[in-house]
Image: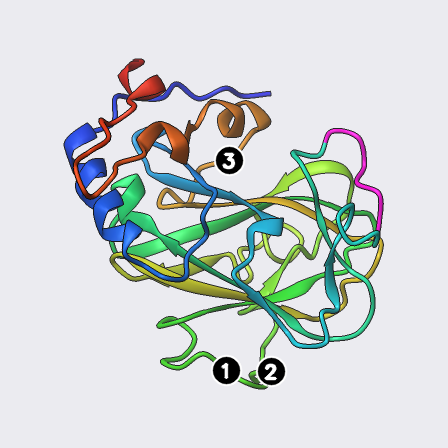
Amino acid sequence: MQTHQPTRLDALSIVFALIAWSVSAFAVTEFKVSQYDGGHQIWFEAEAFDERSPNENYKLGDAENALKPTDGAFGDIVTNAGGSGWLLYRFDISIAKGSAGPWRFIGRVINPSNASDWLWVLGDDGDEIPQVAPAFIRPDHIIFENDAATWTWVWDGDFGADGGTINELKNGENVMMIWTRGSNLTDQYDVFTWADDPLYRATDDDYINAVDKDALYVDPTGKTAVVWGSLKRE
């Protein structure tokens, strides 16, 4: 397994970004950031979604007794317990010092029979969050169309092709939605990452060694000092 060497993060920039993020009412609240191979990455676990469709076809594996996570999962997982719907995530790339441009979506998943889904990104795929399923096109929006019998970081969307994995993200907060295509109880979604280097390939070690949000915490009142933690490592 390839291991990437992190570089020093610009602490002051992250402080300002976190202060801005802290006033957002709806955003993924548990995440990590990194700068591997000279790029920028933001990581969050699949169960950290902000919203899901009213029918709640996407369920937490352990917490909602939908499916026992396979050994090796980082916490709980999300699976499709039946039917069509969506998951929505809000995330801020500025916290990872990222900026607008093409980013790659990567997922740590188990998907033994390539039961894939669609990815929709606000701004790149439309200017308003859809209330009904958009007219998705293969391969433009397809993700996870690949066989992954064990935990695998899947960077491609359609059997080696980008598919829906490359998207134009905006500065600051972004919104992504996963819409049902063919996912079912054979699918387990564990961790997601966005990377601004299209050649970046995520690994378990990269996720483990990324800087946790708690290590970046800033109290906007100024009453709590920044806990730098692993920010100071080379």
Q: Position of residue 158 (x, y in %)?
A: 64, 58
Residue on which the image places disc 1: 130
Residue on which the image places disc 3: 201
Horizontal side of residue 198 vs 189, given as left or right = left
Say which amino acid is labelled 3.
Arg
Q: Residue at x 52, y 34 (%)?
A: 202
What residue span does the magenta drawing correspond to? 67-72
Q: Position of residue 34 (x, y in %)?
A: 37, 32
Residue on which the image places disc 2: 133
Horizontal side of residue 124 vs 64, given as left or right = left
How many neighbours does mark 1 have within 10 angstroms: few (below 14), some (14-19), or many (20 or more)? few
Say which amino acid is labelled 1.
Pro
Q: Residue at x 36, y 61 (%)?
A: 25
Q: What is the distance, in whole Å, between disc 2 and disc 1 at their CAs?
A: 7 Å
Disc 2 to disc 1: CB gap under 8 Å: yes
Q: What kind of element bears circle 1?
A: loop
Q: Which mark is residue 53?
A: none
Q: Nearer the viewer, residue 59 or 113?
A: 59
Q: What is the distance, in whole Å, between disc 1 and disc 3 at their CAs?
A: 30 Å
| Colouring rule applied to residues | rainbow
160 is higher (above) or lower (below) than 227 = below
How many neighbours does mark 3 have within 10 angstroms: few (below 14), some (14-19), or many (20 or more)? some
Horizontal side of residue 29 vs 24, given as left or right = right
Q: What kind of element bears circle 2?
A: loop
Q: Position of residue 11 (x, y in %)?
A: 20, 29
Say which amino acid is labelled 2.
Ala
Q: Nearer the viewer, residue 44 or 26?
A: 26
